[in-house]
Amino acid sequence: VIALPAVLVLVNIKDSAGNTVPAWKAIWPVFGSTNQLLAGLALLVVTLWLKKTGRKYWFTMLPMFFMIAMSMWSLSILLIGNLNFNFRSGKNVVALIAFVLIHMSGLIVVDILRVLFFGKGKKTNI
């Protein structure tokens, strides 16, 4: 668990201007988007729980859509802005992280929205 932060502190990569910086500084812009995405996904789970228990859920659904939409937009901007085919650049690290986050959260959002609106989803034995 502690290995990844240690690697990010000790490894140096090149930023968009070509300067050598610690890896954590290069990926710092992704942190804000990830933080807001986590809030949106938490609201998504709460919305699903409220619907499944028969309570009103619109008051969590509206901020959920906003949080997820803005986070995905921000991650998309980071992905497109940092996509670089010069593989020696540190910009690819940010683009890769943004791509993985978009893909993983997209899968979660699609599955939960399918359950929320259509009552269909993957069956679990929980």
Image (spheres, rainbow, N blue to C red):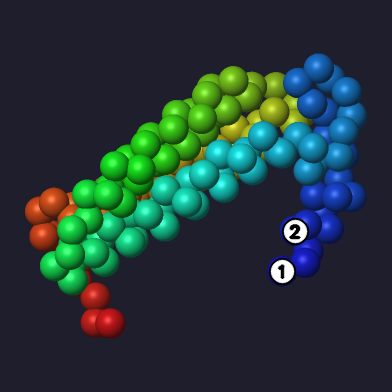
Identify which residue, 49 or 100, lies in the foreground.
49
Q: Is residue 122 above or below residue 23?
A: below
Q: Is residue 49 above or below residue 67?
A: below
Name the secondary structure under disc 2: helix
Position of 67 with respect to 26 (left or right) is left
In the rendered structure, which amino acid carries the disc numbered 1?
Val
Quarter where residue 54 is shown:
bottom left
In the rendered structure, which amino acid carries the disc numbered 2?
Leu
The residue depicted at 57 percent of the width and 47 percent of the height is 35
- Label 2 environment density (alpha carbons within 10 Å; few <14, some 14–19, many ≥20): few
Q: Residue 10 carries which label?
A: none
The residue depicted at 83 percent of the width and 35 percent of the height is 13
Which residue bears the numbered disc 1?
A: 1
The residue depicted at 57 percent of the width and 28 percent of the height is 78
Quarter where residue 53 is shown:
bottom left
What percent of the width, then of the height, locates residue 104?
43, 50
Residue furthest bottom in the image: 126
Residue 121 in view in this figure: no
Residue 76 in view in this figure: yes
The residue depicted at 22 percent of the width and 49 percent of the height is 58
Position of 69 with respect to 11 (left or right) is left
Which residue bears the numbered disc 2?
A: 4
